[in-house]
Amino acid sequence: YRTKRSHKVTPRQCVEDGKAAIRYIRKHASELGIDPDKIAAGGGSAGGHVAAASAMCPKIDSTPASAVSCRPDALVLLNAVYDNGPGGYGHKRVAEYWKDISPFHNIRKGHPPTIAFFGSRDKLVPVATINAYQKQMAGAGNECETHVYDGQSHGFFHISKGGRKMFEDVLLKTDAFLVKNGFLSGENKVAEWTVNAIAHFKATPTGQAKRKKKK
């Protein structure tokens, strides 16, 4: 999706882009070889907000009359910005339409199953907000599995920040969640994938540059 830095857009357009992407994937599911009823949306921080808002905020939509649904069938949220209300993160940027774009203020029955990861020291999404969101989601009858990692800050899930053990733990929990909801099947390959991904990264120019910098 476009960002303020790349295209000077507002958060409204970010969410509109997220919905457009989901519609595109669902419309072209046959040629992409995917199940149009098993589309999961995920992201970290602002990307997590875009994913959540795509599922939860119907009033932010560039093509509301489209016959193709923009609703993801599951959400994987990493340090997602939940609250855009007064006192919440980024309120000034969305002050004119915050009630339409804030996931926390659009909780209702029928949201897709969600798994969310946060750090207890996240300054952008306080634990009180995380707990209140979880409580309201459960109260509305929605599946919302929340994991709060003690002592961790915003973006802890990145392997370069929280370390490999925590990175793999997030992946393992996500894998189990997607298996439980019928999005994945077969043998768990998280550890094997991590080894291969790290080896591939080290072989790239970016990975080699970072190794030289450390030396």
Image (cartoon, rainbow, N blue to C red):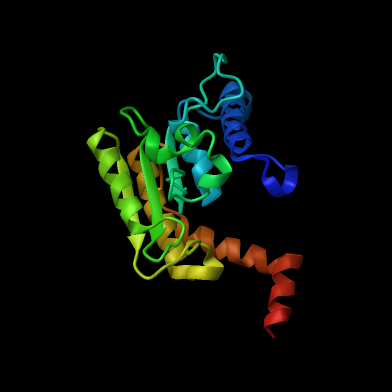
- Quarter-wise, where is residue 60 in the image? top right
Q: Write down the quadrant of residue 153 in the picture.
A: bottom left
Position of residue 77 in the picture relative to residue 96 (left or right): left
Give how far across and how far down residue 35 sits, in percent: 50, 27
Give the tally of numbered discs.
0
Point out residue 21 in the picture as x, y percentages from the top left corner: 61, 32
- Residue located 63% across and 25% down the image: 31
Side of 114 relative to 157 (left or right): left
Foreground residue among 63 and 209? 63
Query: What is the x, y in percent for residue 191?
Result: 46, 62
- Which residue of the protein is positioned furthest toward the bottom in this rendering? 215
Q: From where the camera sits, is residue 39 visible?
A: no
- 172 relative to 83, above or below: below
Towards the viewer: 175 or 33: 175
Left or right: 159, with 132 as reference point? right
At a point 69% along the width and 86% down the height, the residue shown is 215
Look at 47% across and 31% down and name the residue there.
100
For the view shown, which residue lies furthest in the left direction? 139
Q: Compared with residue 21, is residue 212 higher up or lower down, i.e. above or below? A: below
Whether residue 63 can be seen here: yes
